[in-house]
Amino acid sequence: MRLIAKKPCSYGGKKFFIGDEIPAELVVNIEREEKLGVISAANDEAGVPEQSGALYSQEQVDKMIADAVANAGKGFTQEQVDEMIQSAIAELEPFDSDNAGFTVTVKGEGDNVTAVSCSAEDIQSVVDVLQMNADDGAKAVANVQSDSVLILLHALDTRATVKKAAQKQHDTLFSADGNSNESVGGNATTDSITEGADT
């Protein structure tokens, strides 16, 4: 079984890009990574992905084409060979390195694991806030518009002020009715706990 990267990723300290083959011994939990859409397992014998939507590297496509051409003398018609070639080409997707995203998995409460898709800009925003002191970080979080950044900050930043600010900003931006539990005066009361300005 071969593992093919469907998204840019890193295993065992090595970076892999879309279409790269990943040594199986580097991936701890293959099933989980497949479910997250990071990798695809390919059958060694047939070169056929075990799940749909798999990506192939240019080398793999070249090999499939060479195999198809070699099999042409084994009773395949030209139409069958053309169909095999078109099928292999159809599996390729263009890779736009300028807009490449990352999938970061973060542990939540209990055994919950969340896959967060984010851009290089999102990662930079998270790093910027992590490098600020707690008060400046909380103020900066109030301007964040990215769900990915807010989720990563809430998961990674251990400072209570930043964690609360990330949760509050997330609730404000993504609440079901568009309104959060905020009053005009700047204080919100939830379960007999008043949050907001210090008294």
Image (cartoon, rainbow, N blue to C red):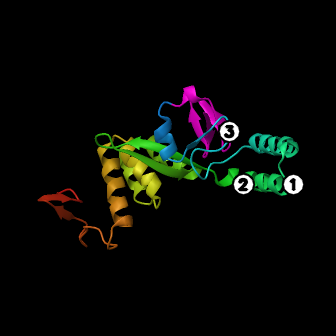
**In the current view of this chain or complex, which residue is farthest to the left?**
192
**In the current view of this chain or complex, which residue is farthest to the top?**
25
Q: In the image, is 163 to the left or to the right of 140?
A: left
- Label 1 crowd (10 A; few <14 / some 14-19 / many >=20): few
Q: Secondary structure at mark 1?
A: helix
Q: CA distance from mark 2 to mark 1?
A: 27 Å
Count numbered badges in the picture: 3
The residues colored magenta run 1-27
What quarter of the picture does the C terminus occupy? bottom left
Front of the two marks 2 and 1: 1
Q: Quadrant of residue 112?
A: top left
Residue 187: give x, y in percent of width and height. 22, 64
Q: Secondary structure at mark 3?
A: loop
Q: In the image, is 179 to the left or to the right of 130?
A: left
- The correct choice, above or below, for 60 with respect to 85 in the image is above
Residue 82: give x, y in percent of width and height. 82, 55
Q: Tell me what residue is drawn at x 33 percent, y 62 percent.
A: 171
Mark drawn on residue 198: none
Q: Marks 1 and 2: in contact by CB < 8 Å?
A: no
One can see residue 12 in this view = no
Residue pointed to by mark 1? 78
Amino acid on which the number 3 mark rests in the picture: Asp
Q: CA distance from mark 3 to mark 2?
A: 14 Å
Amino acid on which the number 1 mark rests in the picture: Gln
- The correct choice, above or below, for 188 with respect to 156 in the image is below
Q: Secondary structure at mark 2?
A: loop
Residue pointed to by mark 3? 20
Residue 191: give x, y in percent of width and height. 13, 59
Amino acid on which the number 2 mark rests in the picture: Pro
Q: Can residue 80 be found in the magenta stretch? A: no
Q: Earlier in the sequence, mark 1 or mark 3?
A: 3
Mark drawn on residue 94: 2
